[in-house]
Amino acid sequence: MKLDFFLALFFMSFFGFSQTTRFIVKDFDGDKIRDTVRIDSDADKLYLMLSTNNFKKIASQEIRRLNFGNTLEETAKGFEFWNDFGRSGFISEFQYNAKAKKMQLIKMKRTDYDIDRFKYGKAVRHGSGKSSVNLLTNQYVGDFYDVHNEVLRKLPTIKETMIFPETFIDSFSDAINFEFEKRCLLLYEEAKKEP
């Protein structure tokens, strides 16, 4: 009886709390045949196999800072690749481009956790800054908080045009995420200067 209880508890904890999704099997290209995307931590790459390309294995470029907190999440028309770090993280969203017959990077999101949520409360509980860029429209939106003289303040929403090169899974690496981060930080620093 104790062994059965222990095994049941082990399997529930293993499947309930193990590392999140490392692969997705889903029809990405709209032909009603399931395709596959997966994270390969040994190669530091994403691998994609689409039925429209006869399941040829397509690899991303090297993801140099592939963190343990990485995962794949399904979206209505594709998937998101989450690569989280201790105090920030990136979400890269991909969707099938029928003209190119490839999965295209269509959106990037970034979250910062650099303001103490225990000291400053609910406003920064889910991050002290969130930003995103829609790569199909080149529209950037950033919402940030700042601490000035020990007082938390919400900065005005930043809306800008931000252009990146068209990126598909085979040309994707985290270099584009870090370029996005660099541009976000410049806009954030400018917003902090305003009274």
Image: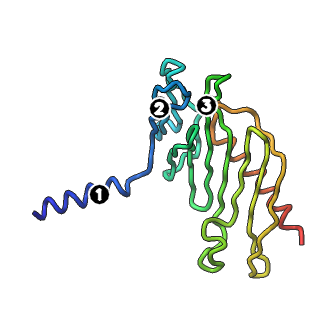
Q: Residues within 10 Å of mark 3 (few under 14, many from 20)?
A: many
Tell me whether circle 1 and circle 3 mark residues in contact (CB < 8 Å).
no
From mark 2 to mark 1, how far is it between C-alphas? 26 Å
Indicate whether 16 appears above or below 136. below
Q: Residue at 68% of width from left, 66% of height from top?
A: 128
For the residue marked with disc 3, what is the amino acid? Tyr
Determine whether 95 is above or below 15 in the image: above
Residue at point 67%, 50% (across, down): 109
SS for callout 3: strand
Q: Report the Cα–Cα distance between label 1 and label 3.
A: 35 Å
Q: Residue at x 50, y 20 (%)?
A: 56
Q: Nearer the viewer, residue 60 or 158?
A: 158
Disc 2 residue type (three-letter): Thr
Q: Position of residue 114 (x, y in %)?
A: 66, 67
Q: Identify residue for label 1.
A: 12
Task: Say which residue label 2 marks.
Answer: 36
Q: Earlier in the sequence, mark 2 or mark 1?
A: 1
Amino acid type shown at disc 1: Met
